[in-house]
Image: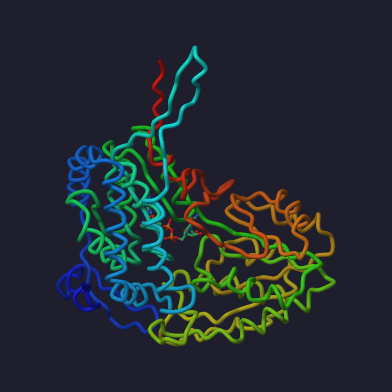
């Protein structure tokens, strides 16, 4: 069992070599990490290729048992993982943050191990017999972002391994320690060579994408990088799952009780301090109840402490990096300059240490302000007033992003009929961003393609094979 110190010591490079990892809340040095080279990537890929046939030859039950053992290992080392995640990513220990993420990693491993994917009989009518098998693809390249670095890695690694593939993962360069720590713990139970990790910047990811020995890329990150991956992956017609950027709309209907939905709206938008792909990023509220919804939301937001992740009372943390702080700052300034109303926040201390951006609600904002049409990926929510529901739905659908959406109503049938008109991979009713390991998740439009989780997720890391006759 690792402590924070022993786990950190295992994954760090000698001080002064490689790259220094700084705490986004305090600016303090956490550790140094190696940056891998192109040769290291080639070695990792060779190792994954060499290990794949023996891994695929194990029974499905055997691989599932190892995923359960990996979940046990995560639970046994949970607090060490939590502290590395909290310090490096910035997210607090409590609330839907670091402990929640590590719990999710174990839960997802177990659910992935337990999901049945039997051979399917396609037709058996006395004349024709055909059945569908799901074979391994080979080696999966797993490329992850910095917002939920351990959970998203598990979403890619667990189904890939279950289906008999081996993996080379490349964590975000902003959350290298998290990627290395997760792999270290998983590899206490997995056979050698099955899960390999390369750390460094986007060029290493690009090397995986263009490698002829990688059969599938699971990618979670920005839409721009996703487009580059599509272009660069054609050499061997690599399979792709692309989970890309979102700019999810939430539409409140005029029949809701504002107090009853306020906390759900808050966490829908501010989970992980807004750094979540499928967070509520623009909220449409009818004129008749606009002030009541804004005030109820502001009251919930005012009670949520933001601060250093390791302080047990905090539920909101800093932004993970300066680049993201500057994006949020620019978008809120654009909203302020347009005359939108700052209900709370919007006044960061730019000279302070740490990338803290205060919880910000912006009301009476133009539907085409930059804060509405660009992905903020941080704790600043624009709230757009509407009078005509059809117009709100039109505005919700006019962007290229289509990851998630939500409808808030006390009339479920009415909410479902509005949900059906929203162009997104998932539409939630009276919540936003709620995920479940058995429920497929994936984007519409330029939020990507392919699905993760459940049976659909297992199929997406498999080669379907028909056997007929
Ligand atoms: P990013 O695209 O900048 O980076 C993601 C990963 O891709 C990193 O590991 C990076 O090193 C790597 N990369 C960069 N260039 C590459 C290239 N040319 N080829 C291969 N890999 C390359 O994204 P980010 O800033 O880390 O993440 C934030 C974005 O991710 C947001 O837009 C967010 O909405 C999105 N996101 C989507 C989901 C989802 O499930 N749809 C989940 C989380 C985050």
Residue placed most toward the observer, 399 or 296 = 296
Asked if residue 321 can be seen in this view, the reply is no
Would you say residue 59 is visible in this rendering? yes
- Quadrant the N terminus occupies: bottom left
Q: Residue at left 56%, top 48%? A: 446
Q: Horizontal and vertical percent for residue 99?
A: 40, 74
234 with respect to 192 (left or right) = right
Within the displayed image, which quadrant is ligand 1 positioned in? bottom left
Q: Quadrant of residue 318?
A: bottom left
Instruction: Give residue 368's quadrant in the image.
Output: bottom right
Most foreground residue, 64 or 459: 64
In this view, 175 is above or below 466: below
Give coordinates of residue 365: x percent, y percent.
72, 71
Please tell me which residue is depicted at 19% across the width and 49% down the height of the picture.
193
Please say if 149 is above or below 344. Answer: above
Residue 69: x and y, percent? Answer: 27, 58
Q: Nearer the viewer, residue 265 or 275?
A: 265
Image position of 14 with respect to 241: above or below:
below
Q: Residue at x 53, y 83 (%)?
A: 348
Q: Quadrant of the C terminus?
A: top left
What's the residue at 74%, 59% (across, down)?
A: 412
Tell which residue pokes out farthest to the front in this image.
126
Q: How many marks are shown on the rendered structure?
A: 0
* Snapshot quadrant of residue 145: bottom left
Direction top: furthest residue = 127
**Location of residue 452 in the rendering, given as x and y in whole percent from the top left corner:** 46, 49
Q: Is residue 452 left or right of residue 463?
A: right
**Residue reaching furthest left?**
14
């Amino acid at each position: 069992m690792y402590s924070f110190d022993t786990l950190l010591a295992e994954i760090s490079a000698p001080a002064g070599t490689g790259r220094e990892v700084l705490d986004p809340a305090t600016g303090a040095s956490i550790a140094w990490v190696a940056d891998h080279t192109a040769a290291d990537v080639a070695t990792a890929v060779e190792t994954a290729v060499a290990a794949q046939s023996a891994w695929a030859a194990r029974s499905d039950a055997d691989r599932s048992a190892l995923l359960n053992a990996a979940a046990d290992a995560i639970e046994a080392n949970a607090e060490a993982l939590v502290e590395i995640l909290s310090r490096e990513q910035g997210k607090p220990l409590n609330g839907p943050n670091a402990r929640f993420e590590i719990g999710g990693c174990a839960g997802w491993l177990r659910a992935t191990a337990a999901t049945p994917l039997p051979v399917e009989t396609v037709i058996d009518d006395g004349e024709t017999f055909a059945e569908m098998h799901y074979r391994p693809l080979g080696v999966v390249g797993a490329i992850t972002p910095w917002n939920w670095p351990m959970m998203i890695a598990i979403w890619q690694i667990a189904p890939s391994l279950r289906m008999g593939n081996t993996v080379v993962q490349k964590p975000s360069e902003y959350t290298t320690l998290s990627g290395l720590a997760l792999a270290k713990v998983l590899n206490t139970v997995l056979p050698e060579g099955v899960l390999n990790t390369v750390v460094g910047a986007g060029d290493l990811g690009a090397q995986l994408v263009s490698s002829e020995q990688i059969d599938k890329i699971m990618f979670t990150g920005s839409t721009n990088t996703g487009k580059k991956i599509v272009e660069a992956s054609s050499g061997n017609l690599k399979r792709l799952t692309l989970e890309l950027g979102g700019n999810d709309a939430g539409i409140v209907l005029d029949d809701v009780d504002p107090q009853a939905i306020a906390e759900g709206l808050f966490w829908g938008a501010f989970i992980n301090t807004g750094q979540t792909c499928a967070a509520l990023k623009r909220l449409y509220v009818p004129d008749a109840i606009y002030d009541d919804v804004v005030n109820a939301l502001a009251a919930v937001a005012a009670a949520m402490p933001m601060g250093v992740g390791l302080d047990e009372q905090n539920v909101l943390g800093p932004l993970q990096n300066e680049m993201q702080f500057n994006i949020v700052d620019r978008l809120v300034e654009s909203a302020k300059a347009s005359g939108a109303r700052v209900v709370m926040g919007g006044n960061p201390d730019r000279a302070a240490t740490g990338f803290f951006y205060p919880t910000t609600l912006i009301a009476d904002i133009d539907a085409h302000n930059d804060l509405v049409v660009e992905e903020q990926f941080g704790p600043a929510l624009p709230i757009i007033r509407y009078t005509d529901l059809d117009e709100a739905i039109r505005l919700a659908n006019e962007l290229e992003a289509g990851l998630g959406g939500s409808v808030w109503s006390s009339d479920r049938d009415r909410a479902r009929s509005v949900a059906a008109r929203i162009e997104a991979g998932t539409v939630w009713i009276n919540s936003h961003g709620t995920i479940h390991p058995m429920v497929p998740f994936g984007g519409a439009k330029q939020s990507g393609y392919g699905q993760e989780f459940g049976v659909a997720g297992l199929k997406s890391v498999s080669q379907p094979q028909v056997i007929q006759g």
